[in-house]
Amino acid sequence: MIHGLKYDCRTHLRRPLALLTAERVASFALGADMLVPVPLHVRRIRQRGFNQSILLGELLSCEWGMPLERRAMQRVRWTEPQINLSASERRQNVRGAFKLSGSVDVSGRRVILVDDVITTGSTVDECARVLRAGGAERVLVVTIARAQ
């Protein structure tokens, strides 16, 4: 289902994936202030037509009654797809690829970072580092899957 959502433009699959996630980890969201999706580079959005983390975040936002800050972060540098990279290559690939947009203040806020899949955690680690550097009090991560 995740592959179909992400690579086959089967965006209708976001609903069952997000609702299952929202149900399973609802207590996780307690006390958080906002959801922030992992941003895609503009080139990737043009290729795919959507950001799957935003699609999932929209439903989590509704289920949990918390704002989804779509533009809190930007991917400022193109990165190669992570799928065929080793853990160390993944960390290097995303280093410096993200920044806060300045349109959303994360200072003192408890942020839930939304991503579709975590494999090594390199992407969410880098995003969390940027959010914490911007003053976020706490950064939690929610995904619909963890690849092993």
Image: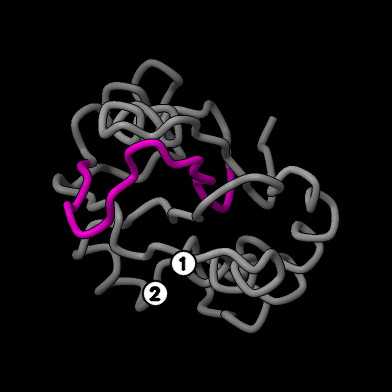
The magenta stretch is 99-117
Q: Quadrant of the C terminus?
A: top right
Residue 54 is tagged as 1
Numbered label tally: 2
Q: x, y percentage for residue 81? A: 35, 45
Of residues 46 and 130, the one nearer the viewer is: 130
Q: Secondary structure at mark 2?
A: loop
Residue for point 27% across, 43% down = 80
Q: What is the quadrant of residue 124 in the picture?
A: top left
Q: Is residue 123 left or right of residue 95?
A: right
Colouring chosen for the image of the structure: one colour
Q: x, y percentage for residue 142? A: 62, 45
Q: Is residue 69 left or right of residue 112?
A: left
Q: x, y percentage for residue 114? A: 53, 51
Residue 122 is tagged as none
Q: Is residue 18 above or below residue 116?
A: below
Q: Is residue 34 above or below residue 61?
A: above
Of residues 37 and 3, the one nearer the viewer is: 37
